[in-house]
Amino acid sequence: MNPVELAHIAKSFGTTQAVADVSFAVEQGEIFGLLGPNGAGKTTTIRIMLDLFKPDRGTVSILGGPMSEEKKERIGYMPEERGLYQDISLERCLTYLGRLKGLAAAEAKRRVSEYLAQFDLTPHRAKKVKELSKGMQQKAQIINTILHDPELVIIDEPFSALDPVNTQMVKELIRDLRARGKTIIMSTHQMHQVEELCDRILLIDDGYNVLYGDLDQIRRQYSGNQVLVRAVSELPRVPGVEQVMQHNDAIKWTLSPGTTPQMVLKALMAQDVALERFEIALPTVEEIFIKAVQEGAR
Amino acid sequence: MMSKLWRVAAHEYRNHVLNRGFLVAILSVPLFLGLMIGMGVMTDIMKQDGRPVGYVDQSGWLLEPVALPADGGSPLTRLLERPVSLIPYGSRQVAQGDLEAGEIQAYYVLSEGYSESREVELVYTRPPGENATERFEAFLQVNLLADQRPEIVHRAVSGSTLVVRTPDGSRELVEGQVMSVLTPILMSITFMILFMATSFTLLQAVVQEKENRTMEILATCMSPEQLIGGKVLAVVGMGLTMFVSWMALIALALLFAGHVLRVEWALQIRLAPSALGAIALVAIPSYVLYCGLMTALGSTVADAQESQQLGGLITLVFGLPFYGIIALVEHPNGPLAIGLTLFPLTSLMAFSLRVAFSTWPMWQLAASIGILTVSALGSVWLAAQAFRQGMLRYGQRLSWRELFRSSATPQSSGAPVVGGR
């Protein structure tokens, strides 16, 4: 049984259809990317998953069945709309929220101290939350999400407001969670982070599934009309190449429809070109995202 | 799962009670009352005239007068009343001369036939202060009773005591013990202040969690019932702390006034236990009703400012019987009084005011408590529905129509929430 399974869920608010037909499953121990343009239905999908909204249609299974009060303690959630108690100290705020996730008082305090040290927030533990910078508050949110060692972590835009150093730290933290067998669902607009972290993705647009599956497979599925080539000498003209672009230390050729990378390679071999590099250029997630959304593939 | 409710309650209680604002709220009411009383006393002292009062004895009855005891009156009386000495004059002319010269504030003339007629004339240019007239009356009383036995003196000085008792004997009012009548009214005012002070806190706590976006995190930690239940418990605890603190401060003030300052009425306040019990039985569901309505309001409005404005309206309705206090006092068992007693929002105030002036039929008390209990449970249910529907509406208002429509089909429709789609 997968930790999360949604089948054909739909949700409307008045006349607005937020989610029309979304289905996906998240496997144990993977980082799952939930992607989509603004207004695609990502947040509503997450809120349905967490039982904050009841779907109009479809079924939701989370950690082996419907949501329960007990299961809430096994889930860590960082919403898009960030929020912490502003007028109390950081340490007290995190300890209280940890206790609401079922931690005993002493254990909550111990874990808060550990995480504050890990996130370089120990000197700010006694400050009121409202006195912290946006980046510090973001780190506090992340601590709150993982403090109770949840099995399933759902994070909406985990990297917003973080500087490069802290972004790297959070990325390592997410990888570490995966290494410890945790399941992570990440909703983000930062495609390069998706490319770097996610095992599988779901792209939603206008309330429907657009792309779903293993990230590498999807990239391969969208590849095929571009190759990266580098030769010892200048590259000759090859039939079927539509566009030539510099790409780092290589040349990226965009192939015309009907031309395959094998045909191009054969043509180069025929001309006895001394090649240093020849590979199929995989598209970036951003390119796939734009293409998929523009095509409106369903 | 109950433990989360208590954790919320403990957190909220600590937040509300352990701060300067709460201490100020506790001290503000006794301080305000003290200030009002103090200003009244100061005004009274400023109006007093400390100049002597003269008397002319034309009857010769006071040739060898008995002087007033030096320590007459309570310490408070000595503290608050400026002492006035009495000066005997041989003739009207001399006394009149001193009056016109401003040496004395007034003088009394005992007529020639005073022994029979007890006729006394008071001469003044401006009316003398109460301290002067009381001093002279006490002087006359001491001299009139000079040859009587102590027990007769005591009885005569005590005077009569009028006791008004209800036909069933359940209530009585002793002359001079005005505070026993005023106490239920003061209690109802205290309830109003308590309601306002604590329920606004509850209302703001819900709005604040919407404003600072903690709502979504809390909603994924526990059920709305646990969150709302914990908050209501915290407010009840806070209210009890405030009420007990006020009562303790007032009791201390009364004990001080009674034992140290020897203010008699401070120790004579009597309230029938049945009246107190009845007020408590009405007050508890009223408090829950008020909290439920405030929470529902907090969950439907967009921000704290709007919640305060609308919360003020609810408080106004709760205090409605005060505006009809004259009608309630004149006809404590009239249709208006009964109607306001049975209407849940005005029950507590109407009942407290009626308790001060009349008895009440048991059926009205039972009906009032029954209606209030149903209304209180309804308000908590409504609060939970409003919380469920309004918790993710950041900066948006949830209309009452939407609330009732959504309550019929939970979370199936409504306007889009904020925070993406």
Image (cartoon, rainbow, N blue to C red):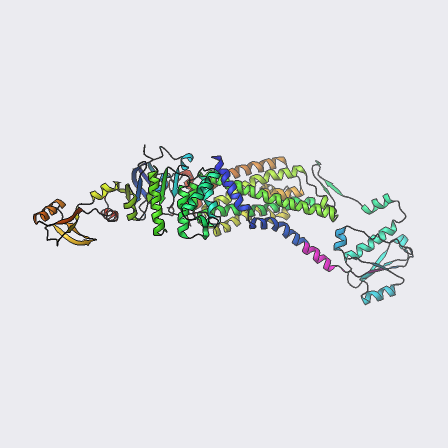
- Nearer-the-camera pick, B249 or A53: B249
- Nearer-the-camera pick, B172 or A97: A97
- Nearer-the-camera pick, B312 or A166: A166
Report whether B192 appears left or right of B307: right
Report whether B63 appears left or right of A260: right
- Please name the residue shown 47% across and 40% down the image: B227
When asked about the image quadrant of residue B331, the answer is top right
Report the label total: 0
- Nearer-the-camera pick, B356 or B299: B299
The span picked out in magenta is B38-54
Q: Position of residue B380 (x, y in %)?
A: 50, 39
Q: Is residue A11 magenta?
A: no
- Please name the residue shown 13% across and 51% down the image: A241
Q: Position of residue B174 (x, y in %)?
A: 73, 43
Query: Furthest residue to the left?
Result: A270
Is residue B421 something one can see in this rendering? no
Q: Position of residue B122 (x, y in %)?
A: 82, 59
Report whether A291 appears left or right of B137: left
Is residue B376 something one can see in this rendering? yes
Report whether A231 appears left or right of B136: left
Q: Position of residue B49 (x, y in %)?
A: 77, 60
Q: Please say if A269 is above or below B361.
A: below
